[in-house]
Image (cartoon, rainbow, N blue to C red):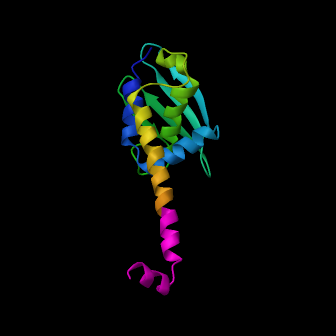
Amino acid sequence: YYDIHRIVKNIMEAADDQAIREGRRYFNEDRVKLTSTTNAASPKFSFYVLGKTDMYNVSINTQNGKWNCSCPSWRNSCKHIVASALYLVYKSPEIFGSTSSTPSSDWEKILQLQREKDKLFKEVLTFDKTVSSLTSDDIRKIFE
């Protein structure tokens, strides 16, 4: 059991909505490969993540609590880092001291909130399309 729960939580909290959505998609599409782990007492995990146009290197270091990616993103937690963190949780449960594929940590709540935000966003888009399809006469009838 390594102290990476906090690091994964920090990664998810530092990620914006788009990075979480895209990172989740990259993870679900199996674009992440764990390439190495160093120093069993305080591991640094290295990954390759297949991006749109290139392969990116991601590292998550539990000794200093830092992570980085070789992509050109300006984000602190890009989609490649999010996908790698999801890989650690869902595909490497032994790292978390559990055999469960579903963690009960706080960051799972963050992902649930993201799913709810995605659902609301889709509802708003549907509403916007409905409103934009109204004719002038339809709008007048609403205010009569």
- Residue depicted at 45% across the width and 39% down the height: 112
Foreground of the two, 19 or 141 = 141
Which of 96 and 130 lies nearest the eye of the viewer?
130
In magenta stretch: residue 110: no
Does residue 27 appear to the left or right of 59 in the view shown?
Answer: right
Q: What span is colored magenta in the figure? A: 125-144
140 part of magenta stretch: yes
Q: Position of residue 124 (x, y in %)?
A: 46, 61
**Image quadrant where one finds the C terminus:** bottom left
Magenta residues: mostly which secondary structure?
A: helix
- x, y (%) of residue 57? 54, 38
Say which of 121 and 28 sits in front.
Answer: 121
Is 37 positioned to the left or the right of 41 in the image?
Answer: right
Q: Is residue 135 left or right of residue 105?
A: right
Q: Is residue 25 above or below residue 42?
A: below
- Tell me where residue 7 sits by quadrant: top left
Seen from the viewer's position, the closer of residues 47 and 140 is 140
Residue 78 visible to an observer of this rendering: no
- Quadrant of the image occupied by residue 27: top right
Residue 47: quadrant of the picture: top right
Number of marks in picture: 0
Residue 24, image x, y percentages: 54, 41
Pick out the residue farthest to the front: 144
